[in-house]
Image (cartoon, rainbow, N blue to C red):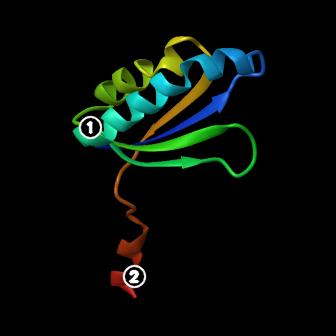
Amino acid sequence: MKSIVILTRKTDASGEALASLAAQELEAVWQGFATGRVRAAHGLLEGAGAVLELETATSDEAMHFVEGLPYVAQKLLDVQCYALTPFSGFALLATR
């Protein structure tokens, strides 16, 4: 199951708190790549945050991974997680 996770910095998250966990956060995301859970990671062009593309067996597994990220565990980020499904709109092309 693919999921998209949008992580944005909470307004009350201090730069010092983020800096103190930065190495741990990067390691956790890197481990996600190593295990195949994280398929892509992107920064946001505007605002502070990131987007992760995850591949997991279930949406619960995706949330478990995200909740284990140091920034999320310390409540420094807002999390939006969306399970994805194949886009069905292209089926309309077959009816033309």
Looking at the image, is 54 positioned above or below residue 70?
below
Instruction: Find residue 30 and report its image quarter.
Output: top left
Q: At numbered mark 2, what does the secondary structure look like: helix, strand or loop?
A: helix
Residue 55 % position (x, y): 30, 43
Q: CA distance from mark 1 to mark 2?
A: 30 Å
- Categorize mark 1 by other alpha carbons within 10 Å: few (<14), some (14-19), many (20+): some
**For residue 81, side relative to residue 19 (left or right):** left
Could you tell me which quadrant the N terminus lies in? top left
Instruction: Find residue 21 and report its image quarter.
Output: top right
The residue under the point 38% across, 63% down is 88
The residue under the point 49% across, 26% down is 23
Q: Which residue is mark 2?
A: 93
Contact flag, marks 1 and 2 (Cβ < 8 Å) = no
The residue under the point 70% across, 37% down is 48
Which is more toward the observer, 93 or 73? 73
Residue 61 % position (x, y): 29, 26
Q: At numbered mark 1, what does the secondary structure look like: helix, strand or loop?
A: loop
Could you tell me which quadrant the C terminus lies in? bottom left
Q: Residue furthest top?
A: 74
Looking at the image, is 59 positioned above or below residue 51?
above
**Disc 1 versus disc 2: nearer the observer:** 1
Q: Which residue is mark 1?
A: 56
Q: Amino acid at mark 2?
A: Leu
Q: Amino acid at mark 1?
A: Thr
Q: Which badge, 1 or 2, comes first in the chain's sequence?
A: 1
**For residue 14, side relative to residue 60 (left or right):** right
